[in-house]
Image: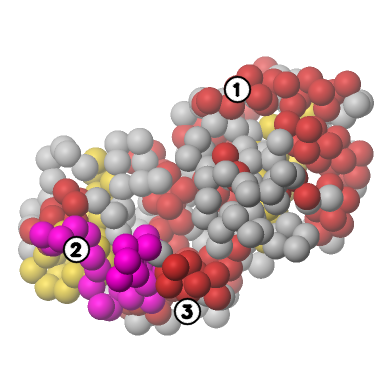
Amino acid sequence: MRVLIVKLSALGDVLRTTSLLRPLVGRYPGARVSWLTSRAALPLLEGNPWIERAAAFGTAGFRPGFDLVLSLEEDASAARLAERSCAGELVGVLSRAGGLTYTPSSAPYYDLSLLHRDPDGGHAAADRLKASNRLTYAELWLKVLGLRKPRRPGALRPVLALAEDDRAAARAVSSGVGFSGGPAPIGLNPGAGRRWPAKRLSVESAVRLAAALHRRFRRPVLLFGGADEAARNRAIAAAARRRGALVLDPGTGHPLRSFAGLVDLCEAVVTTDTLTLHVATALGKKTFALAGPTSAAELDVFGRGAVLTPPGGCSCFYRPRCLRARSCLDRFPAERICRAMDAWVEVR
């Protein structure tokens, strides 16, 4: 059986979709899985034992005639290619004259999305469904595909196959900023992609949290962030060090696999950023996700950590900017985050 997955972006979404590979191949033993993605996301699929071939969208494609196609990109060109590639069952996004729609089979997921429009063109119904949803991303797609949920939580983790070269590159970066041994650090990513500023901690909150993590667990704190957060991270690290905390800034903009190698150095990871979350869970790290204007229910740490929501919840559901004078995420007490980690992280 030939299976094609069309999922191009965002990086974190590509990685979390790899959680479907084990149950998919379990359902169809011997299935040959191909994956069409963005050039930027290809490193996340490199070496994945469940994927026969991965290729970048816009390059030489695959021979059509797939028995099952998962069309998971909300993009007209990608959806049309998915349909052309399919000789059997197609699940997911479709491109039609009136715009993008989706197969009835994929309604458990896409009814919660921006593709589900009200008669007036709004998304109130989708927002209500998403707010009431209690299934994780992987569980929603298991439901769509009729796949059995594995008994072991870790069996639904994303799949990221690091090589020794990736780990060596990460060790070189970390030693360059003063970490070359001793207690494993706590990774902290207080940022988010440019599209979602409401998912970031403020600099002041990030400084307080970094200092609290170091005081509580007596471990270095390794700071992560996106390429456009370099100056912000330098400011966070400098301010936390003035408070006496050992906070290391390895810089931003590393190749994806080197970044994953840095995450792999950590004892635990605290993050507002979902790419960091999915990398950490794929590597089996103790992970603590701070969920603001997003669906906390869809996030999963697979029995190793916690998904934490702000006191009183977040009323800015999927808005890029917070509606409150003090953002939802900045209302997280650092002490509460540390307490959630106490059972998981040894004090050194």
Q: Secondary structure at mark 1?
A: helix
Task: Assess whether residue 198 is covered by the magenta stretch.
Answer: no
> In this view of the protein, can residue 186 be seen by the observer?
yes
- The residue under label 2 is which amino acid type? Leu
Q: Residue at x 79, y 28 (%)?
A: 247
Q: Earlier in the sequence, mark 1 or mark 3?
A: 3
- The residue under label 1 is which amino acid type? Ala
Is disc 2 surrounded by few (<14), some (14 to 19) or many (20+) residues within 10 Å?
A: many
- The residue under label 3 is which amino acid type? Lys
In the image, which disc is placed on residue 94? 2
Say if mark 3 contacts mark 2, CB within 8 Å: no
How far separated are the C-alphas under marks 1 and 2? 39 Å
- Which residue in the structure is indicated by mark 1? 230
How far separated are the C-alphas under marks 3 and 2? 26 Å
Q: Which residues are magenta?
A: 96-122
- Nearest-to-viewer mark from 1 and 3: 1
Front residue of this view, candidates 242 and 172: 242
Q: Earlier in the sequence, mark 3 or mark 2?
A: 2
Q: Please determine whether, in this image, residue 82 is positioned above or below residue 265.
A: below
Residue 225 lies in quadrant: top right
In the image, which disc is placed on residue 149? 3
- Nearest-to-viewer mark from 1 and 2: 2
Q: Residue 235: horizontal and vertical position, in percent? A: 73, 21
Q: Secondary structure at mark 3?
A: loop
Left or right of residue 73: residue 253: right
Q: Residue 43: horizontal and vertical position, in percent? A: 38, 39
